[in-house]
Structure formats: structure tokens, C-alpha cells
Amino acid sequence: MKRLSIGKIRGLQQIANPDGIFTMCAMDHRGSLRSMIDEERPGEVNYEEMVERKLELCSALAKYASAILLDPIFGAAQCISHSALPNNTGLLVSIEATGYGGGKEYRITKLLDGWNVGKIKQMGASAVKILVYYRPDLTELASQQLNTINLVASECIKYDLPFLVEPKSYPIGNEINNPVEFTTLKEQLVIKSAQDITTLPIDVLKAEFPADLRHKKDKPELIGLCHRLDTSSQTPWVILSAGVDFELFCQQVEIACQGGASGFLGGRAIWQEAMYIDDAQERVQYLSTVGADRLKRLTEIASRYAVPWYKKLGLSAQELGQTSEKWYEQY
């Protein structure tokens, strides 16, 4: 049974629904969003345009999510100051710089300059998120990435904020031109990444789906894989969408939650089509109808099958932490 501090408990309560299930929507995209807005010239998409899209996403979808994930550059403060983020929706804020250093086969995560856990706490956010490209088989690089995670984890302990980590695998060498080979290997990569990363003092793992549903169709086998992922993770975990189409993501969420996940943190699978619509009014209409319905449907699936985050930690909703008369003196 894990012992949680009071700030971490409060943050986890804020990003989950009242039943302890995470039904979260990601909108912290930077480079990938620029490419959706202008495929030919992503570099020319300006600050105002990016902020406008974040405000549209947040205004249309945040009320249907237990929490949303925003970036500090275009989204987090802007959505608060424009009243686009409801006061009862949790807020996760990303801490990493967009992209990676070190080249395509040796991807190093950098923290965003001028941004840190203290500032995320200060702005009233509920939790911190980091994305790390991670290959457990590249030991030297993996160790470097784990050091970065550990550094942020210790800051999250200092400021008593929940910490969510998103490891993403990627192909190297022959796998780059052989997607089937990479897909087969990915099962092991995702499970081993969960094992490595959740030995650190993090709070929630944002995991990739450990198989490709286009190649693997056997549901009991897929649930079994997610059970293995669940056993490998020492923390509650959620499934990410990685831009797959919506119907596929619904299947992934159902299988993952049957295999032990505590919900989802989906982004593009929920709203990507809207970003290709040039007319702002049509975009908002799409997000408020199709986007909202998708989020509601995913929430129904997660509510039916997911494991409450505190159950994964061996806790009960009535006793998430221990308090005594003088707890505040030691806090």
C-alpha cells in the first residue's frame, strides 16, 4: 500500500472524476498542432492562432473531462484568463520543451526554459506532466531520461503536486523501414518502460497501447497484454490516444480499462478533424458536437471498466492518507 501526501491526494482528486476514474483530454500539442493548422508552412502559424485553437478546444471540451492537459506557452494561462477552463475541471500542465534533442534515434527530453514545477504549483494547476521518448534497450539514453524524470519527480515531492509521466517508444535502425517489426517489439518496450519508470516516485503513468489493433485482433490476448502492463506499473496508469482514429481509441480504452487502466488521457483522437477546418465557427460547432460526444462516450466506457486510481494503490476512498491532530506541524 502506497502512502500519499495530502497535496498529492488533492491533486489526484482534482484530475479524476468523483469515482476515482481519469477521463482526461490532452490539448498541450505544439509542433503537431502547427502542422495540422498549416501542413505546408507550420513554422508560419503564429502565437495568436495557436492560442485561439487552444481556447476553442478548452471552451468546447473541458466541461466534459475530469481534467485537461495544456502547455504553458499557448494554453494554460490563456485558458484560465479567458474563463475557458471551468473551476471544477482539473488542470495538468506540461513541463518539457517541444520536440527532442540528440537526433531521431537518440531522443533526449529537455525541460522548457524558464518553466518549472514551482511555477506550475504557483499558477494553481493540479498536476505536472512530462513526455519522454524512451527505449529501455538503449541503456545509456534510458538512464539519462530516467534522471530527468527523477529530477522533476523530486520537485513534485517538494511542491506536493502529482506527477504524470508519458513514455513514448520509437523505431530505430531497421525498425524505421519495417513497421511490422517495430509493432511486434513495441509490446515489450511499452511493458518494460512502465516497469522502469514507475520505480521512480511518480504518480500516474500515461502509457501507449501495448499492441496494434490492426495486426492483433484477439481480445482476450489484448486484455492479457494490458494485464501485463498493469502488473509492470507500480502506479495507476491511463491510456493515451497517439492520434489514432476515434473508433480505434474507443476499443483501446475498453481493453486497457478491462486490463487494469484507471482511465484515459486522449487528445487528437477526440478533436483532430476539427483542426483541419479553416472556418472558426464550423470548427467550434464540430468540437461542441462531435468532440463533446466523443468525450462523453469515452467517459462511459472508462466509467464501466476502469479501476479507480486509489484501488490500484491499495487504498480506499474513505482513507486515502493518514492524518493526525498535529499533521500540519510536520507538513
Image: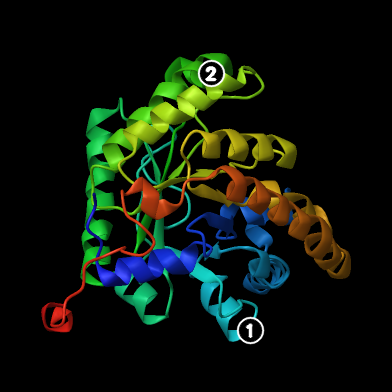
Residue 66 image point, x, y percent: 56, 64
Give me the C-alpha separation between circle 2 and circle 1.
45 Å
Residue 75 located left or right of residue 96: right
Which residue is the extreme one toward the front?
A: 318
Dot 2 falls on a residue whose secondary structure is helix
Q: Looking at the rendered structure, which numbered label has been put on residue 83?
A: 1
Q: Residues within 10 Å of mark 1 (few under 14, many from 20)?
A: few
Q: Looking at the rendered structure, which numbered label has been put on residue 221?
A: 2
- Quarter occupied by residue 114: bottom left
In the depicted structure, whether residue 258 falls above or below residue 80: above
Q: Residue at x 21, y 60 (%)?
A: 154
Q: Amino acid at mark 1?
A: Ser
Q: Kindly tell me whether residue 29 is visible in this rendering.
A: no
Q: Residues within 10 Å of mark 2 (few under 14, many from 20)?
A: few
Q: Residue at x 59, y 51 (%)?
A: 303
Instruction: Give the total number of marks visible in the rendering.
Output: 2
Q: Residue at x 58, y 41 (%)?
A: 242
Q: Kindly tell me whether residue 224 is visible in this rendering.
A: yes
In the depicted structure, whether residue 175 falls above or below residue 157: above
Q: Amino acid at mark 2?
A: Glu
Pointers 2 and 1 in contact (CB under 8 A)? no
Residue 33 image point, x, y percent: 64, 55
